[in-house]
Image (tube, rainbow, N blue to C red):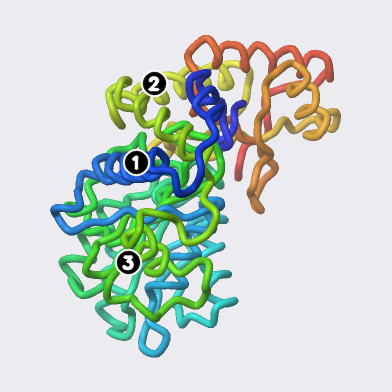
Amino acid sequence: MYTPGPLTTSLPVKQAMMVDLGSRDQRFLNVIKEVQSGLLDLAGVSEQEGYECVLMQGSGTFAVESVIGSVVPRDNGKLLILSNGAYGDRMKSMCEIMNIDHDFIRYSDREVPVAADAAARVTEDKSITHVATIHHETTTGALNPMSEIGRALRDARPDVTYIVDSMSAFGAYPVNMKEDNVSYLVSSANKCIEGVPGFAFALCEKDNLVSTEGSARSLSLDLYGQWKGIQSNGQFRFTPPTHSLLAFRQALEEHTQEGGSQGRLDRYEANFRILRDGMKEMGFNLYLEDSIQGAIISTFLVPDDPKFDFQEFYQRLSNLGAVIYPGKLTEADSLRIGSIGRLFERDMHFVLRSVRQVLDEMDVKLPVKQMG
């Protein structure tokens, strides 16, 4: 699997799911505590320092919507969204559906948000109470300046709450919520920590979280309600993803053994370099400039050859055992290949050989068309 998640997992992670535990079993409640503590540690904070981990059933989008729909006040809240891709745009859609007052700065897919823009906007508009952005924009593979934005906001308006969607960055790119001025950080089980789908999580500044009681616009996605429920008896309010959590505990152990976030990032960056250089040698061009390209997923422009058909290309690669992602751009036709999951250098060489083979079978000629 060469996708940004769900992704390839280790055999021990898969085997961890072969145990059936009840949602009220003390052994399972211990798993919840271990996972919460491990995630806070990855964010450079702890409960003793005033931070909490809220586990939420469902995909990463569920957790993002839970945060946005729960922490922005109903009467006097306003969210500024900094977007450079589909996932920032999705936050805007959430606000529109939930009738949340919001402002929106949209950058090109080939740019990253600018910290000074965020600072200037919250300085000009005192009604803005919250700011949200994406850490790694999976649309293109852009690594956004999450830390710079947080620190600029603290200097400009320390009363503003900063929300970060770190879905496909957390667990690889190091984060320190306190130093980076992040009040809410959201990610998912099936990304850089290499678990399986089933739940996501929000790491929260406790005082800020407590102040949101009664603000939620949903019952099941009530962030404060979810936290309070687990605090009261150690249990999820509604049916928990037991097997996913068991897998994730194992994934966290493997993450630690690999050297934590830095160790994982080192492997991903090695994977990315092999992929980038091999695709370039074949004639593929990366969509992004090197200065903003992350190591998680890479967007390549497709061949400018009428014989190239993505669906056929995808299926032929899949038949060989190399599952990639379609592009998600509006500006250009593209495809995406991930470097994350239980992948190593040999796996990157395999996908490159597979791409070469399929291009030959389809009689597709390179290089690809350059962006104007």
Q: Can you say which quadrant of the picture contains the N terminus?
A: top right
Q: Which sits in the foreground, 92 or 49?
A: 49
* Left or right of 252 on screen, residue 154: left
The Cα atoms of the two marked residues, 3 and 1, are separated by 44 Å
User: Could you tell me how far apart the alpha carbons at marks 1 and 2 are, in whole angstroms?
Assistant: 31 Å
Mark 1: amino acid: Asn
User: Which amino acid does the dot numbered 2 rest on?
Assistant: Arg
Earlier residue among tags 3 and 1: 1
Q: Looking at the image, is 22 positioned above or below residue 105? A: above
Q: Residues within 10 Å of mark 3 (few under 14, many from 20)?
A: some
Disc on the earlier residue, 3 or 2: 3
Residue 77 picture location, percent across and down: 37, 82
Residue where numbered disc 3 is placed: 117
Residue of label 1: 30
Q: Which residue is mark 2?
A: 267
| Label 2 environment density (alpha carbons within 10 Å; few <14, some 14–19, many ≥20) | some
Relative height, residue 284 to residue 74 (above, below): above
Provide residue 326's location: percent of width, then percent of height: 68, 39
Q: Nearer the viewer, residue 136 or 242?
A: 242
Q: Which of labels 1 and 2 is toward the front?
A: 1
* Depth check, front residue: 188 or 121: 188
Foreground label between 3 and 2: 2
Can residue 276 be spotted in the picture?
Answer: no
* Residue under the point 84% across and 32% down: 306
Q: Is residue 57 visible?
A: yes
